[in-house]
Image: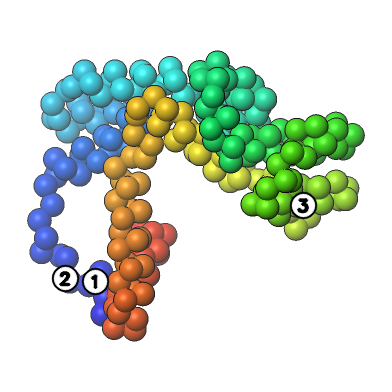
């Protein structure tokens, strides 16, 4: 059974709905010029709410987001505290990830002494909670390698890891400011993935295969 077969080919999709989903993604990620081009070229009704939403997102999120992508985690923490003094206090996981990013940048700069001092002063308290222990152990293990990028823990120094932390931070800031944490297209992918997982679990081999977005795109 494959629900990706002709079963859905006759389902009608309103082109305006597709455009709204694309526009929502552009607004969510603050691609203002591209959003304006889409509105202009597609003949969509221009709404001041879209542009105001982008401006608000940029004002609230973009500078903090860029700090994380550039590896300046301490600056991101400072800006987060200016935005809301208790945001990081209430989201210990996010605070932990930001501190890890700073530690990793010290490792990347081969400042092992600074990294060790920072770990003892800022990261050690998290070791009291079991859920942080494995990642803390990975972080400490980086100190043993002359080339940490070639270590089994290289993922901590990857751009993908930094991007994931930046995305988590972005969602936290958006939620704090009563803005959607995910774009509509992201929610659709999440819902499709969960529905297929549930069907696969309940129906087994008689159900649809698990949904993989990368595979879907390559079809």
Front in this rendered view, residue 114 or 21: 114
Q: Earlier in the sequence, mark 1 or mark 3?
A: 1
Q: CA distance from mark 2 to mark 1?
A: 6 Å
Residue topped by disc 3: 137
62 vs 179, left or right, is right
In the drawing, what numbered circle is on residue 3?
Answer: 1
Residue 143 picture location, percent across and down:
85, 46
22 vs 193, left or right, is left
- Estimate how packed mark 1 is, as few (under 14), some (14 to 19) or many (20 or more) residues with alpha carbons within 10 Å: few
Query: Is residue 125 placed above or below 73 in the rendered structure?
Result: below
Please indicate, yes or no, whether residue 13 appears anywhere in the rendered image.
Answer: yes
Residue drawn where x is 36% and y is 18% of the image? 55
Front in this rendered view, residue 12 or 205: 205
Residue 215 picture location, percent across and down:
40, 64
Residue drawn where x is 54% and y is 35% of the image? 91
Residue 96 picture location, percent across and down:
64, 38
In the drawing, what numbered circle is on residue 13?
Answer: none
Q: Earlier in the sequence, mark 3 or mark 2?
A: 2
Query: Is residue 18 placed above or below 46 in the rendered structure?
Result: below
The residue lying furthest to the bottom in this view is 205
């Amino acid at each position: 059974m494959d629900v990706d077969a002709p079963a859905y080919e006759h389902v009608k999709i309103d082109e305006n709905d597709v455009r709204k989903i694309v526009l929502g993604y552009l607004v969510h990620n603050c691609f203002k010029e591209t959003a304006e081009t889409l509105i202009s070229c597609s003949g969509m009704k221009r709404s001041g709410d879209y542009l105001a939403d982008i401006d608000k997102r940029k004002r609230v999120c973009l500078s903090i987001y860029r700090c994380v992508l550039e590896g300046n985690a301490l600056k991101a923490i400072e800006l987060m505290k200016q935005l809301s003094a208790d945001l990081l206090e209430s989201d210990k996981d996010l605070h932990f990830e930001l501190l890890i990013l700073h530690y990793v940048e010290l490792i990347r700069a081969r400042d092992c002494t600074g990294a060790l001092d920072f770990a003892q002063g800022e990261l050690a308290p998290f070791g009291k909670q079991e859920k942080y222990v494995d990642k803390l152990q990975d972080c400490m293990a980086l100190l043993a390698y002359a080339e940490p990028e070639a270590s089994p823990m290289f993922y901590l120094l990857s751009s993908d890891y930094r991007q994931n932390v930046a995305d988590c931070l972005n969602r936290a800031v958006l939620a704090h400011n009563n803005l959607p944490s995910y774009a509509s297209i992201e929610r659709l992918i999440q819902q499709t993935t969960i529905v297929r997982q549930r069907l696969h679990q309940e129906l087994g081999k008689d159900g649809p295969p698990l949904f993989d977005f990368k595979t879907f795109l390559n079809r």
